[in-house]
Image (cartoon, helix red, strand yellow):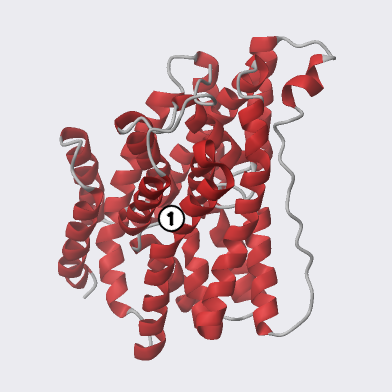
C-alpha cells in the first residue's frame, strides 16, 4: 500500500536539488546505474521516497516516452513537491552533464577530435559494465522478489532485449496487463476503472521545414517524444537522423558523441547536447538538449497525478508490478547488449569483473572513484593493446 501520499516530506526542496545536482555530477553508469542509485539513496538510505512511489515512477518511466533516468528523477521530485519539485529535480539532474558535454564539444571543435577519449572509454566502458551489472542485480532482487510470474516476465524481457537490441514499449504494458489479469481476475466493468488512469498521453511533434536550428529542435523533440526506455534505445534513432538523414555528423563524429555521453555522468541522452554543439554551437546544444528533455518532463508531470491518485488500487499495483518486472528485465538485457560492445578483449573483461567484485565486496565504494581509476587504466593499457 502506498503510504507516502499523506506523509510529510522529511527533506527540503533545497536538499532535493542538491541531491540531483550531485547525482548529475557524479552519477556514472548510464540509466541502469542511475535508477539503481536513486533507489539506494532515496529509498533505502535516506527514506525520502517510499518503495511504492519508486516503483510507480519506474513503471511510468518505462511506459512513457523519453530518457528513463531523467523521467524517474522528475517523477521522484514530483512525489512530495509536485510541479516545482519535478522541475527542480529534472533541471538539477541534467544541468551538470549538459555543461560537461558543452565544454567537451568546445574542445572537440577546437582541437579537431578526441583521440584520447578512445583510451579513456576503453577503460571506463568496461568498468561501467560492472557498475551496471551490480545495479541490475540489486534492482531485480528488490523489485521482482520471489514471484515466479514476475521472474518469468523478467527473463522474457531480458532475452528479447538481448536478441532485438532494443526496448519494445508495448511489451512493458503487456506485462502489466498480464499480472493484472492473473492477480485481479477482473470482470469487463473493472477494466476502465483499474487501468484507464495509467496510460499517459504522448506528446506529438510535427515535422517542418526551416533553418538549421528549427530542424535541430524538431528532430530532437521527436527523439524525446517517441523513443522509449534508456539511452540504449535512442542511439539508433539519433544515428538514423544525425548521420544518415541530415548528414550533420559523420560516423566517427557520431561514435565520439556517444563516447562522450558514456564517459560523462548523468543521463546518456545528454549526448544530444554534444551533437547540437557540433552542429550549431551553444544555441544548437541548448535547443537539442531542451527539445529532448521537455517532452518527457511534460508527460511525467501530466501523468504523475494519476499515479498518485490511483496508487492504492490493487489493479494499479498489479499493473505496476508487471511493468516493473519487465523494466528490470529490459535493463538487465541492456547490460548484456552494452557488454558485447564494451568488452572487446581480456583486459576489458577483467576490468568489468573486478569492478563488479569490488562493488559486491565493498558496497560503499564510490562509483566516481572506480570510474576515475578505470580511465587511468585505459590510458595506460589502450596504447599497448592497439600498437
Quadrant position of residue 308:
top right
Q: In the image, 86: left or right of 313? A: left
Judging depth in this view, the residue of 377 and 160 nearest the camera is 377
Q: Residue at x 73, y 25 (%)?
A: 195
Mark 1 surroundings within 10 Å by alpha-carbon count, few (fewer than 14), some (14 through 19), many (20 or more): many
Query: In this view of the protein, can residue 250 be seen by the observer?
Result: no
Q: Say above or below: 219 vs 70.
A: below
**Is 183 rendered above or below residue 131?**
above
x then y, percent, for residue 127: 27, 52
Q: Nearer the viewer, residue 286 or 333?
A: 286
Q: Quadrant of residue 379?
A: bottom left
Q: Is residue 172 above or below residue 385?
A: above
Residue at the (73%, 54%) spot, across then down: 203
Q: Position of residue 219 (x, y in %)?
A: 67, 69
Query: How far across and how far down the image is residue 309, in percent?
Result: 65, 27
Q: The C terminus lies in which quarter of the figure?
A: bottom left
Please indicate whether residue 277 sits to the left or right of residue 117 in the image.
right
Q: Which element carries disc 1, helix, strand or loop?
A: helix
Judge by depth and name the residue closer to the eye, 240 or 318: 318
Question: In this view of the protein, can residue 38 be seen by the observer?
Answer: yes
Q: Residue at x 19, y 54 (%)?
A: 369
Residue on which the image places disc 1: 93
Say left or right for 287 vs 19: right
Instruction: List x then y, in percent, for residue 197.
Output: 73, 30
> Number of marks in the image?
1
**Looking at the image, which residue is at 27% across and 56% down?**
345
Q: Nearer the viewer, residue 151 or 322?
A: 322
Amino acid at each position: 500500500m502506498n503510504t507516502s501520499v499523506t506523509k510529510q516530506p522529511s527533506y527540503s526542496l533545497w536538499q532535493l536539488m542538491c541531491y540531483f545536482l550531485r547525482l548529475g555530477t557524479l552519477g556514472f553508469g548510464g540509466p541502469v546505474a542511475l535508477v539503481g542509485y536513486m533507489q539506494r539513496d532515496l529509498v533505502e538510505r535516506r527514506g525520502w521516497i517510499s518503495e511504492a512511489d519508486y516503483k510507480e515512477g519506474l513503471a511510468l518511466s518505462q511506459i512513457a516516452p523519453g530518457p528513463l533516468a531523467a523521467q524517474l528523477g522528475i517523477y521522484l521530485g514530483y512525489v512530495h513537491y509536485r510541479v516545482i519539485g519535478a522541475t527542480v529535480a529534472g533541471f538539477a539532474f541534467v544541468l551538470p552533464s549538459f555543461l560537461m558535454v558543452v565544454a567537451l564539444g568546445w574542445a572537440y571543435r577546437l582541437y579537431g577530435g578526441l583521440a584520447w577519449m578512445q583510451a579513456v572509454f576503453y577503460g571506463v566502458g568496461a568498468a561501467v559494465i560492472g557498475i551496471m551489472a551490480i545495479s541490475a542485480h540489486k534492482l531485480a532482487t528488490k523489485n521482482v522478489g520471489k514471484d515466479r510470474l514476475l521472474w518469468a516476465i523478467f527473463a522474457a524481457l531480458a532475452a528479447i532485449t538481448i536478441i532485438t537490441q532494443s526496448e519494445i514499449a508495448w511489451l512493458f504494458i503487456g506485462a502489466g496487463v498480464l499480472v493484472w489479469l492473473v492477480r485481479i481476475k477482473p470482470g469487463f466493468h473493472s477494466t476502465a476503472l483499474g487501468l484507464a488512469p495509467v496510460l499517459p498521453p504522448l506528446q506529438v511533434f510535427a515535422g517542418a521545414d526551416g533553418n538549421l536550428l528549427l530542424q535541430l529542435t524538431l528532430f530532437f523533440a521527436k527523439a524525446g517524444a517517441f523513443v522509449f526506455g534508456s539511452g540504449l534505445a535512442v542511439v539508433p534513432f539519433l544515428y538514423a537522423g544525425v548521420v544518415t538523414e541530415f548528414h550533420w555528423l559523420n560516423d566517427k563524429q557520431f561514435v565520439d558523441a556517444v563516447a562522450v555521453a558514456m564517459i560523462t555522468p548523468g543521463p546518456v541522452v545528454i549526448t544530444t547536447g554534444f551533437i547540437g554543439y557540433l552542429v550549431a554551437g551553444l544555441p544548437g546544444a541548448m535547443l537539442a538538449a531542451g527539445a529532448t528533455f521537455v517532452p518527457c518532463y511534460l508527460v511525467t508531470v501530466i501523468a504523475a497525478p494519476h499515479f498518485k491518485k490511483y496508487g492504492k488500487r490493487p489493479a494499479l499495483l498489479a499493473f505496476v508490478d508487471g511493468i516493473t518486472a519487465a523494466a528490470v528485465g529490459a535493463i538487465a538485457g541492456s547490460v548484456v547488449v552494452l557488454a558485447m560492445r564494451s568488452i572487446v578483449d581480456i583486459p576489458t573483461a577483467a576490468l568489468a569483473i573486478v569492478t563488479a567484485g569490488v562493488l559486491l565486496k565493498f558496497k560503499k565504494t564510490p562509483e566516481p572513484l572506480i570510474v576515475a581509476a578505470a580511465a587511468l587504466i585505459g590510458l595506460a593499457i589502450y596504447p599497448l593493446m592497439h600498437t
